[in-house]
Image (cartoon, rainbow, N blue to C red):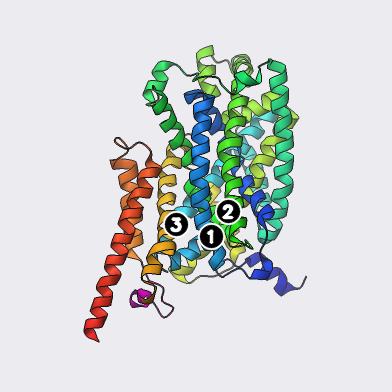
């Protein structure tokens, strides 16, 4: 391959439209969306949701989130399919303007690199656990160093290479995880009916502190827990949807991703924690010196508990699931992060060093984020950023499907020579207002923050945007 061809493959149309000749079908896209959603974090959310609400209520919440997330992901993915642009670059045209898209890039980059850091931390803790190593500076350097080099190498050569890697890793992950679950079920002797119908298992006082005393409260808790990732996945659908041959290709891929995240991972996580909790409690008591009460709390203490569970139950197979599950997600996290950083630095400073630089930068930032309390803050972290990314995706969708079609002829009035706004203040204002109102102001009255965000965006953005455009058109006509 010639030097120019290699450079083109690495750049991967980061700031331009993907040509039709490089588009792909639903299978390649679906392996990628399923790959980024089948991780230890999602297995942990499945265990937590089922323990709080019981398996049936949690699964029903997962089905609802699957429907909502698929529709939002398909809507944003369709915009990317039509334009051939990644989520943050298409935000220049729809919803935010050229300079305004930097805000979207900053939000999405922060969230996706946060996931990158979180998954790295889980792999690090799992490695220490499996090999019985201490948490030392030397171990941090060589483990995180190997992981960082691996993600950079696997992400460098663009989406075509990434989709091939994802397809292999997803298949292996599903086979090995299925074997571990089958072994757990066979060992513990639980019936299938018991596995898919067990009730809430946390003490009543703990459920009350979560607002999950009633069936409705349990459903709302699960909905907020699971739907926090829907906004981020919708933006990932756009990053992948620019490679779709047809709109339905990214629609199928969006469905595959949400089903893998909110149905498969939920059910698998619930079964793993339910069948394996007694063994994990005994392990913590015997090896960590914990009391039974402390060991019970540790079972759902954080996403790293799922890593411990897989390693205790599955041994080498568990280590394989942990490694593969995180690797396929990390490659896609790094890929999306490099795209958002490419747009961020282009619109802020006009700096275009090439996507590879941002692949490296994303991993460096991810390492720096490890010094924060990533694992401990994962629930609140995902909830608030899920609200913000949902608002971002909603504004893009509203602009493309409704606002821009109502006032396409007047876009040049507030834009540059290409008819693109410098800053679309209506979009920026909508994201700020919707996020603050949904998460901080109205959450006590309307607990499902995702729904609040969608409603506020649907009302506020068209009102602000169309009102501004009409005013500018009248001003232009008066001057003429």
N-terminal of the two: label 2 or label 1? 1
Residue to which mark 1 is pinned:
78
In the picture, the quarter occupied by the N terminus is: bottom right
Circles 2 and 1: CB atoms closer than 8 Å? yes
Counting other residues with Cα less than 10 Å from the Cα at mark 2, is it few (<14), some (14-19), or many (20 or more)? many
- Residue 301 at what x, y percent from top left? 51, 26
Q: Left or right: 293 with respect to 166? A: left
Q: Which residue shows up at 28% across the image and 76% down it? A: 473
Secondary structure beneath dot 3 equals: helix
- Residue 335 at what x, y percent from top left? 60, 56
Residue to which mark 2 is pinned:
251
268 is higher (above) or lower (below) than 327: above
Q: Where, by quadrant of the figure, is residue 411 drawn?
A: bottom left
- Magenta residues? 410-423
Query: Which residue is at the far bottom?
Result: 480
Q: Where, by quadrant of the figure, is residue 280 drawn?
A: top right
Query: Which residue is at the far top?
Result: 292
Measure how far apart labels 3 and 1 are at the Cα level: 23 Å
**Taking the image as drawn, is residue 302 in sight?**
no
N-terminal of the two: label 3 or label 1? 1
431 is higher (above) or lower (below) than 277: below
Residue to which mark 3 is pinned:
106
Per the picture, the main secondary structure of the magenta-coloured stretch is loop
Secondary structure beneath dot 1 equals: helix
């Amino acid at each position: 391959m010639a030097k120019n061809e290699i450079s083109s493959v690495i750049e991967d149309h980061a700031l331009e439209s993907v040509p039709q000749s490089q588009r792909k079908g639903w299978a390649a896209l679906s392996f990628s969306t399923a790959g980024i959603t089948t991780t230890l974090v999602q297995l942990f959310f499945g265990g937590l949701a089922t323990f709080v609400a019981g398996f049936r209520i949690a699964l029903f919440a997962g089905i609802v989130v699957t429907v909502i997330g698929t529709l939002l992901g398909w809507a944003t993915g369709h915009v990317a399919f039509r334009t051939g642009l990644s989520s943050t670059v298409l935000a220049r045209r729809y919803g935010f303007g050229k300079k305004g898209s930097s805000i979207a890039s900053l939000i999405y980059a922060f969230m996706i690199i946060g996931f990158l850091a979180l998954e790295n931390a889980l792999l690090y803790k799992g490695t220490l656990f499996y090999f019985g190593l201490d948490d030392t500076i030397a171990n941090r350097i060589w483990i995180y160093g190997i992981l960082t080099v691996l993600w950079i190498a696997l992400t460098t050569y663009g989406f075509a290479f990434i989709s091939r890697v994802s397809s292999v890793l997803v298949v292996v992950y599903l086979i090995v995880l299925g074997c571990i679950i089958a072994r757990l079920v066979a060992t513990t002797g639980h019936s299938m009916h018991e596995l898919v119908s067990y009730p809430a298992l946390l003490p009543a006082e703990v459920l009350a502190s979560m607002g999950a005393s009633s069936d409705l409260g349990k459903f709302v808790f699960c909905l907020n827990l699971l739907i926090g990732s829907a906004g981020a996945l919708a933006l990932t659908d756009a990053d992948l949807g620019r490679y779709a041959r047809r709109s339905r290709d990214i629609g199928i891929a969006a469905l595959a991703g949400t089903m893998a995240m909110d149905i498969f991972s939920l059910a698998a996580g619930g079964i793993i924690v339910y069948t394996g909790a007694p063994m994990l409690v005994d392990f913590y008591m015997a090896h960590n010196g914990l009391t039974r009460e402390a060991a019970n709390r540790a079972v759902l203490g954080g996403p790293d508990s799922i890593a411990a569970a897989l390693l205790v139950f599955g041994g080498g197979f568990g280590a394989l699931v942990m490694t593969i599950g995180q690797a396929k997600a990390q490659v896609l996290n790094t890929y999306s992060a490099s795209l958002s950083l490419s747009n961020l630095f282009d619109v802020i400073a006009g700096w275009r060093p090439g996507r590879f630089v941002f692949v490296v930068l994303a991993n460096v930032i991810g390492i720096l984020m490890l010094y924060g309390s990533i694992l401990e803050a994962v629930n609140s972290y995902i909830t608030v950023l899920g609200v913000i990314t949902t608002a971002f995706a909603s504004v893009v969708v509203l602009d493309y499907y409704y606002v821009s079609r109502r006032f396409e002829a007047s876009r040049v009035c507030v834009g540059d020579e290409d008819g693109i706004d410098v800053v679309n203040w209506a979009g920026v204002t909508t994201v700020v207002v919707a996020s603050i109102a949904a998460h901080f102001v109205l959450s006590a009255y309307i607990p499902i923050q995702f729904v609040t965000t969608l409603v506020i965006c649907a009302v506020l953005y068209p009102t602000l945007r169309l009102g501004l455009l009409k005013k500018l058109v009248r001003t232009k006509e008066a001057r003429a």
